[in-house]
Image (cartoon, rainbow, N blue to C red):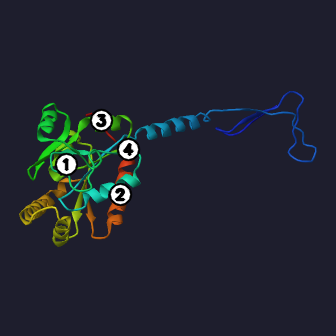
Amino acid sequence: MTKTGSEGSAVVELEPGERTSDSGPDRQVASMNVKPVAGDHLGEDADDLIGDLRALRRPRVFIISGPSGVGKDAIIEQLRERFPEAFFAVTATTRERRPGEIDGVHYFFLNEGDFRERLAEGEFLESATVYGNLYGVLKGPVRAALARGQDVFVKVDVQGAAEIERIVPSAVSVFLSPESASTLLQRLRHRKTDDPTELMTRFATATRELSSAPSFDYVVFNKQDRLEDALDEIAAIVRAESCRTNQAEIHL
């Protein structure tokens, strides 16, 4: 005897000699063979589709930029703790090393001749002259990190951000803004590394750089004594970008 359920349900077949009863304590079913029917393969198809959705994830390049003194270094240091699996590009520069800075950690400190040689060989993802010093991000480490599937964070000035976006159009750019001009000037003064003339030059440049903020994908305000708020906003941006359905594969 065969009992067939509705479409998509299992089919129960009874072997010869078996009987069933819809009531009573002596209901007997010797054995049941459950066979799949049309529709059971949909689960496998759904798993395949879900797998395809997971495969849409691509490593991304996140640009952290903003005017001098806005707190880019502090933001990057904390992002390292929040995203330990990501790669943080180290910028090469010809400027003098500041107290406490470590070569290869904070910057790659190069002499001008070495820098220009690598620049001529096309080894930089971006390069710029800022306040008379050369800065640039080497392509090799970034390319290797992307190949490993790591998201890449790049800290650059506004000029460098524009150059990277030309080479990597799918990069996600975040502009760090001070909460006010007076706060920015106070931060620059607290550095105590610039003479008064250079200080005002940096402040004037920073003021001009604020006008480039609309060309970035996101703007985050780094308020005085509210670093965690800025970090939370950047972390939310990273999570949201990681969930995009259309993610381009980056080739350098």
Which residue position holds label 2? 78
The mark lying in front, picked from 4 and 3, is 3
Whole-Å distance between the Cαs marked 1 and 4? Answer: 24 Å
The mark lying in front, picked from 4 and 2, is 2
Q: Where is the N terminus found, in terms of image quarters?
A: top right
Q: Amino acid at mark 1?
A: Ala
Q: Earlier in the sequence, mark 1 or mark 4?
A: 1
The answer to the question of whether label 3 and label 2 lie on touching residues, with beta carbons closer than 8 A, is: no
Q: Which mark is residue 143?
A: 3
Q: Quadrant of residue 29?
A: top right
Q: Secondary structure at mark 3?
A: helix
Which residue corresponds to the image point at 27% horizontal and 43% vertical from the top-left? 170
Which residue position holds label 4? 245
Q: Amino acid at mark 2?
A: Gln
Q: Which mark is residue 161?
A: 1
The answer to the question of whether label 1 and label 2 lie on touching residues, with beta carbons closer than 8 A, is: no
